[in-house]
Amino acid sequence: MLKRDAVARQALDAIAAIVGSRWVRQAPAELETFASDGLPTRHTRPGAVILPGSRDELIRTVRVLAHQGIPFVARGAGTGLSGGAVGDGGEVVLALTRLNRILAIDPANRRATVEPGVVNVRLSEATRPHGLHYAPDPSSQTACTIGGNVAENAGGPHCLKYGVTSSHVLELEVVLPDGKSLVLGSAGGEAWGPDLVGVFVGSEGTFGIATRITVRLVPLPRAVRTLLADFASIRQASEAVSGVIASGLVPAALEMMDRNCVRVVEDSIYAAGYPTDAAAVLIVELDGVAEAAVAAEAAEVERLVRAHGARGVRAAADERERARLWQGRKKAFGALGRLSPNLLVQDAVVPRTALPDILDRVGAIAAEFGVTVSNVFHAGDGNLHPNISFDARDPQEVTRVERASAAIMQACVAAGGTITGEHGVGSDKVHYMPLVFDPDTLAAMRAVRRAFDPAELANPGKVVPVHACREWTGLSGRRRETVRDGERRREIERVEA
Amino acid sequence: MAGTGLTIVRRVRSMLGPDAVVDTDASGMPRVAPRAEEGVALVLQAAAAEGWRVRIEGRGSWVPADAPADLALTTRALARVTRLDAADLVATVEAGVAWGDLQRALADQGVWVAADPPGEGRSVGSVVATGTAGPLRSGFGAVREHVLGATLVTGEGRIVRAGGRVVKNVAGYDLTKLATGSFGSFGVVTSVNLRLRAVPRADLTLLGEGERDALLDAARAMLEAGITPASLEVLSPLAAGRDSWTLAVRCVGSAPAVEADAQAAGGASQIPLAPLEAVEAGRFWRRALAGATASPVTLRMGALATAMDDALDLVLHHLDEHWIMAGVGAGGLRWSGDAPADRIRLLRHAAAPREMPLTLERAPWALRAQVGYFGAYREGVGQLVGALKDAFDPAGVLVVPIADER
């Protein structure tokens, strides 16, 4: 139920007149579909779900919500892994999946303009005939939307060479939470002043909603080599990663999977032919404009990984084998579902040279808390995904999972890294933010949020923990230290202790 | 004036020590060089409380010394490479380090920041705060792509530590983007974490000469053929130091990849491209970039590859073809020469409806104050920028003319 019933009913009637009553969902069974995203530990039914059918309907809907002061959560495909597309309960969810048109493809300038609900992989399919693709490729790319990618600043394996979402977004038409529509950035990439596109990307739906997104496209590589290297120890595999990066070669992707992950994939329908006795495997992809050049680079990578102890190195013989190697990697999260009813897909980053030690530490944490961790991740970026298998029906196990997660975050931050590389803070990691940022920095984030959304209607409660900031009091310059976050903060402190 | 030079000097010395005030100009305005970010914060807190107006300086090569202020705050004493992790490809660098010195120190470790901003003797902070990219923007992106983290001391004197030291990071809002390219609107950049890359093993520059439009076509043909050179520039005769317009293509990477790119570039361009010897190539780019600051005014203008002819026509119509580098692969051009405010306003006015933002990068102070670094904003954006400025510099301490005075 929406928080303020009478106002809300009036607002929903007005919105129904805009989008059509069939696109306003309020039945419990329908709301249930929108009560979770990819984060298994959060489940909260929204007050209502609106599915606008056009940019114009979306903007008018936001204006009604703004006028009535009703908080809302924008949502793409709901594949996010940090609880960012789920409200606290009672918010209006604006599901953008009907805004799914590719508005323009401009091959000469390597640009495309899309609506936020366009599925990531569809854009690459549509631009393929022009020899171009949209490079950021999250593992969920067959389902996730570009709008969601913009909100989360999504990554993916090939971001090692091509950069994350933020590097590819040039211009955004946005509707601010007060209903104003404006354009940030320009299609050429030059800003009209401060870099507001840069700060909007990754703001997790708290600055407003992107209604039109102009992205950079990247030429499809003409030549690709994909190698699979297997190692007898995780440490050797991570040292090989550092060796490749230090060589100056820039692979298109450099991914690692540990033994748990390899075995689960090989037992599933996604079996890719990974050696099941390996402690870890690396997938290294090289690409470029010419076969000979890519072959030469691949030969060098093979030499490097062997020098770091690779037992075997196999090159995909053809496109089919390459696709199979990648399918095992990209569907690993799905395959891990076989281990247990629930899977917490964690996300953290460390400096690349810290990989060997941090993977040892993750293993030790798993043992300490009695949880099963499988690692499948973007090793070239130092972007870990320690995935914890568990059964959400067992409250004691859930507690152990949460404590193990907190310990892993703590270890990654201590190693000079951070708490999320591509999944976002959402609701899942709000309480970890004080591990990374001091009160003044958190307060600056909050101040930026208020510049975009003074009433804090857009995705309230996400990204920045309210009680850990120093309050910025504006003109007077006084500062007030407020009480630190309660229960969840204490959870971290228990682990820290 | 909110305080006389002498009272400000006394106050600053009492806070930061006797040597923090490095000099005073003819009007008695002190130049303050804090040795730590906490010192920057103290000065700005005092400025906010006392109503002093503060001009931000790096190494004194970019912002004119006649900018009206009660105090010049320079980052020149913040001049240490705090931490260099070549194996992790990241360096923490204080804002006052000279860009050239940094690149030399990095080269000793086999790494570099893949950016080549114009401007001799400039500080790292100046490059980041003004977002000045060079021709390498085509292959390696704008300045923001190299900044993993930044420490920003706000106009109120709060120390904000944005971003981090890792290449992927979505923890919280990306405040490094607000520090990069905003000309100090929100605060003083005191330190940055820069993304490094291994020095490429091969680095080849090819040149072609001809009519301007034919060179633009050749450059576009390369992009359409799926090649993305590290630099892809069409230079005016003065910028190239040659008799005619010149197309310059730079490919970097592994030796076989560079060879393949060069071959593909030559094949696509349909004009003869001649490779330069390494020493000659270095000299060519240095000479070209030196021209960007040889005249009083430098500006940049965004333009898509297919709109570059139009953008150049506009520049030639409203200004001249004095010194121009058109980054066909980078989405914009840079012009340098001399021009009064009205001409720049007319150009900006003509460029805006064509979706070509014009940023004034450097100019005599009077011109900066008149036309502003960014000029007018698109509808709605000015309000947003104003709200951000109110949050970061509520007392209006920082003297940063971003908008057109009209």
Image (cartoon, rainbow, N blue to C red):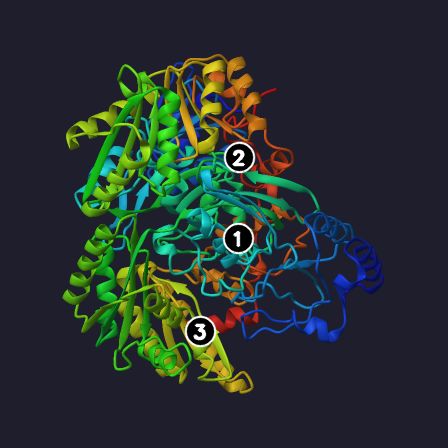
Which x, y percent locates residue B373? 49, 26
Q: Is residue A248 visible?
A: no
Depth check, front residue: B196 or B208: B208
* Tag of residue A27: none
User: Mark 1, chain letter?
Assistant: A
Q: Is residue A204 above or below residue B294?
A: below
Q: CA distance from mark 3 to mark 2?
A: 52 Å
* Tag of residue A150: 1
Q: Which residue is mark 3?
A: A333
Q: Which quarter of the figure is the C terminus of chain A placed in? A: bottom left
Q: CA distance from mark 3 to mark 1?
A: 22 Å
- Residue plotted at (38% across, 70% down): A329
Say which amino acid is labelled 3. Phe
Q: Secondary structure at mark 1?
A: helix
Q: Is residue B272 left or right of residue B27?
A: left
Q: Which quarter of the figure is the N terminus of chain A placed in? A: bottom right
Q: CA distance from mark 2 to mark 1?
A: 36 Å
Q: Is residue A462 left or right of residue B239?
A: right
* Tag of residue B48: 2
Of circles 2 and 1, which is in front? 1
Which x, y percent locates residue B127? 37, 34
Which x, y percent locates residue B347? 52, 19
Q: Is residue A28 above or below residue A383?
A: below
Q: Secondary structure at mark 2?
A: helix
Task: Please determine if labels 2 and 1 lie on a single subunit.
Answer: no
Examine the image and state in which quarter residue B126 appears.
Answer: top left
Q: Is residue B357 above or below residue A338?
A: above
